[in-house]
Image (tube, rainbow, N blue to C red):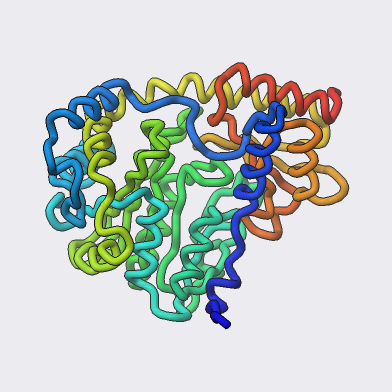
């Protein structure tokens, strides 16, 4: 009998996988399920990127069809360095401090595998992004949750972090704008957290996947730019949401050169390199930074306000509006548990949402609703179905 290690068996698949599978089956059988589930943007990649890919198929030569450098093709690493310098106001050496990965999920897994010893603790805000939780446990680490509150808008504060630190704490993860809450953490708190942890030699891992998507005057804080932050800051980035290219799988790690040098071993073992055609696409997409993603903000903000209006018509739902990302973490006053609610909404209202328990057991009374993933008419139809399902005020 093959024995699977407990660290793998103990990790649960996110419920979004089963819900997506059910949605696909229902639609194939003639249903009309609308997804408000995955945190993907409604828009496609910039046309300039697609043009560059078409050209590369003809002009890039044999280099397109083979392995590239483990750290990423030079063109992309230099384009990322330029983006970080011009948009984030931070400097990284493209030759030694940048590593291109097949998506930022893998970037996180590479970092966890690189820095963790068995039993090391990694603190993540709760509600948490489930893939981070999975990666920590699969890498032999221990997840420690930083409990946040709905009443405080799910803000992270140093006092919250301090309460969970131990001598085993190896890293603290910051995701702002946050998945799943949509919260943009206050710059002053990010600065305090970063400096305090740096003084103690604890890694600060900043996942910047949603850095562009901020509303109502909120702004993303680049952790690597905090004065006095030190060399223990690890920045993870993604082009998936920024440029509507989730399927192309391009992310990156920006960090101290020694960490990148060691992480390169893990990258080589996991994937060797990101797909060359995707790297060509990403290089071209970055030429449209930040104009292209910023051109989508007005539409996303309008969708966010439409969601707020729809929720006001449903007494069962309560949302303390947050100011970033592509989704809302909504409390649901419904008897029977939120997992049952998510499945009821799928099967009876034909609307896909993500159950709050995916982001921590204590969030069973919530669902995450994405306002970014469907075309506008389908999005509004999904909200109309929810209003009809729960009944207007």
Determine the residue positioned at 63% across, 33% down. 35
Q: Is residue 286 above or below residue 152?
A: above
Residue closest to the eye, 72 or 272: 272
Query: Where is residue 79, by image quadrant?
Result: top left
Decide if residue 223 is in sight here.
no
User: Residue 223: x percent and y percent?
Assistant: 34, 51
Decide if residue 257 is in sight here.
yes
Q: Where does the N terminus fall, quadrant-wise?
A: bottom right
User: Residue 7: x percent and y percent?
Assistant: 54, 75
Determine the residue positioned at 44% across, 80% down. 118
Left/right of residue 259 with respect to residue 245 in the rendered view: left
Q: Is residue 62 above or below residue 273?
A: above
User: Residue 326: x percent and y percent?
Assistant: 53, 34
What is the number of callouts on the image?
0
Determine the residue positioned at 23% across, 69% down. 262
Left/right of residue 118 with respect to residue 182 in the rendered view: left
Left/right of residue 51 with respect to residue 334 in the rendered view: left
Q: Is residue 102 above or below residue 118?
A: above
Query: Where is residue 347, by image quadrant?
Result: top right
Q: Is residue 229 above or below residue 288?
A: below
User: Residue 189: x percent and y percent?
Assistant: 45, 52
Q: Where does the C terminus fall, quadrant-wise?
A: top right
Residue closest to the eye, 385 or 296: 385
Determine the residue positioned at 35% across, 62% down. 110
């Amino acid at each position: 009998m093959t024995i699977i290690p407990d660290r793998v068996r103990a990790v649960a698949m996110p419920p979004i996988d089963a819900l997506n599978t059910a949605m696909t089956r229902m639609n194939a059988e003639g249903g009309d399920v609308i997804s408000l589930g995955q945190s993907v943007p409604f828009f496609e990649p910039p046309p300039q990127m697609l043009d560059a890919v078409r050209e590369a198929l003809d002009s890039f030569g044999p280099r397109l069809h083979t392995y590239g450098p483990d750290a990423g093709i030079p063109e992309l690493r230099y384009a990322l360095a330029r983006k970080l310098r011009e948009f984030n106001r931070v400097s990284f050496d493209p030759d030694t401090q940048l590593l291109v990965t097949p998506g930022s999920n893998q970037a996180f897994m590479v970092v966890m595998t690189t820095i963790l010893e068995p039993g090391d603790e990694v603190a993540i805000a709760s509600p948490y992004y489930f893939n981070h939780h999975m990666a920590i446990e699969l890498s032999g680490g221990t997840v420690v949750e930083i409990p946040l509150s709905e009443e405080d808008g799910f803000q992270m504060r140093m006092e919250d972090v301090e309460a969970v630190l131990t001598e085993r704490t190896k890293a603290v993860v910051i995701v702002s704008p946050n998945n799943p809450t949509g919260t943009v953490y206050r710059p002053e708190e990010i600065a305090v957290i970063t400096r305090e942890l740096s003084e103690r030699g604890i890694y600060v891992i900043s996942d910047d996947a949603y850095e562009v998507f901020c509303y109502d005057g909120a702004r993303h804080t680049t952790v690597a730019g905090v004065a006095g932050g030190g060399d223990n800051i690890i920045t993870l980035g993604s082009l998936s949401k920024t440029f509507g290219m989730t399927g192309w799988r391009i992310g990156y790690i920006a960090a101290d050169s020694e960490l990148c040098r060691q992480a390169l071993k893990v990258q080589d073992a996991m994937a060797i390199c990101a797909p060359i055609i995707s790297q060509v696409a990403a290089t071209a997409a970055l030429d449209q930074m930040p104009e292209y993603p910023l051109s989508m903000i007005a539409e996303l903000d309008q969708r966010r306000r439409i969601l707020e209006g729809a929720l006001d018509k449903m007494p069962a739902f309560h949302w303390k509006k947050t100011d970033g990302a592509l989704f809302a973490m909504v409390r649901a006053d419904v008897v029977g548990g939120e997992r049952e609610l998510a499945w009821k909404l799928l099967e009876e209202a034909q609307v896909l949402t993500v159950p709050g328990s995916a982001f921590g057991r204590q969030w069973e009374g919530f669902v995450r609703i994405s306002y970014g993933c469907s075309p506008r008419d389908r999005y509004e139809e999904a909200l109309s179905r929810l209003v009809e399902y729960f009944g207007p005020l």
